[in-house]
Amino acid sequence: MKKFASNQGLAESFKKNYVYFVADALYNIRFIEDPHWSDEDEAAFNEQFTHQQHNDEFVAGKMIDDETIDQLMEAILSDFTPRAFEPIEALLELFEGVITVQYIAQNQGHFWLNHETRPYMALRAHRAQINALQGNIQLAIDELETLLQLNPMDNQANRHWLMNCYIIKGQWQKLDAFLADFDSEELYATASRALSEFHKNGDSSQAKQYKKKLKQLNKHFIKILTGQEKLKDEGFDFYSPGSKEEVALYLNSLGKQAWIAAEGSLFWLRKKL
């Protein structure tokens, strides 16, 4: 993957062309279902949009191709440093200029399923993740909660970051309320339930049951979290339940920080049943 911040050519491409990509996406959001809009109307919209945003700096109506769009999104979404904030904010500002209250009311719950709003969701989730990694936990929580309202099915797995952020901030009531509406026994939810129970009641019988469940879900989890087993520093494109890669994803979404935030939890986790 190319890093946006380390690729000057791609950065210049973003600077010159991102407005056209956004204009196209925003046109689709607002007018794609309007039968009265013609190709000429779209061209006029693009011209007005680009002239407003860049003071006639660029030739209006020039649209970049899908490959360039993919490169731009890949560049932004592969950068997990604060350098990515500027292009993210620029794009989101343009999106939010036309995603009206009415549009949100009509499409809330389906923002990830709508192709036109998927880049908007991806950018917001990435901003939340960077904030979380930078220690801006409350900012991340606020954004992740909004994203889950826009897409309760959570195709982006924002819940994984949110649960760990709740724990880090000590927002146990919010975590418990979230878990009460979440029936899944996936690794993230089980780990969060274990931490909540341990925080409230220590080494209770229920806490022991959660620890036992963690071992059943992933035999590597406890060993990796407590330093008894190491992870290879390698990238991966997919994971299977119960694999080391699953634990790596958990750790990448502030999993270790969540356990550190719950005093004594790592010592308890290592303790034999």
Image (cartoon, rainbow, N blue to C red):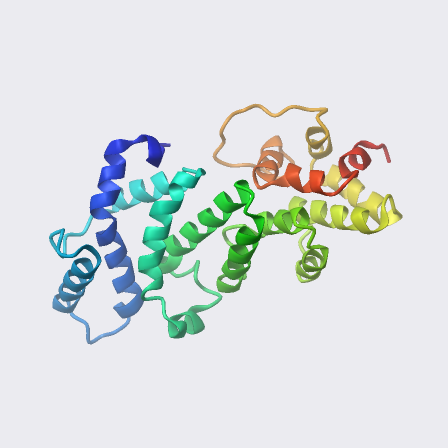
Q: Is residue 245 left or right of residue 54?
A: right
| Rendering quarter of residue 213 | top right
Q: Residue at x 74, y 43 (%)?
A: 262
Q: Residue at x 48, y 43 (%)?
A: 130
Quarter of the image with the C terminus is top right
Depicted 13 relative to depicted 189: above or below: above
Q: Nearer the viewer, residue 52 or 163?
A: 52
Q: Is residue 244 left or right of residue 26?
A: right
Quarter of the image with the N terminus is top left
Residue 223 image position (x, y, % from top left): 72, 29
Depicted 90 relative to depicted 82: above or below: below
Q: Is residue 149 left or right of residue 28?
A: right
Query: How many tags in the picture?
Result: 0
Q: Is residue 162 left or right of residue 143?
A: right
Residue 207 image position (x, y, % from top left): 82, 46
Q: Residue at x 24, y 58 (%)?
A: 23
Residue 257 image position (x, y, % from top left): 65, 39
Residue 19 image position (x, y, % from top left): 24, 53
Q: Residue at x 57, y 23 (%)?
A: 232
Q: Nearer the viewer, residue 179 or 82?
A: 82
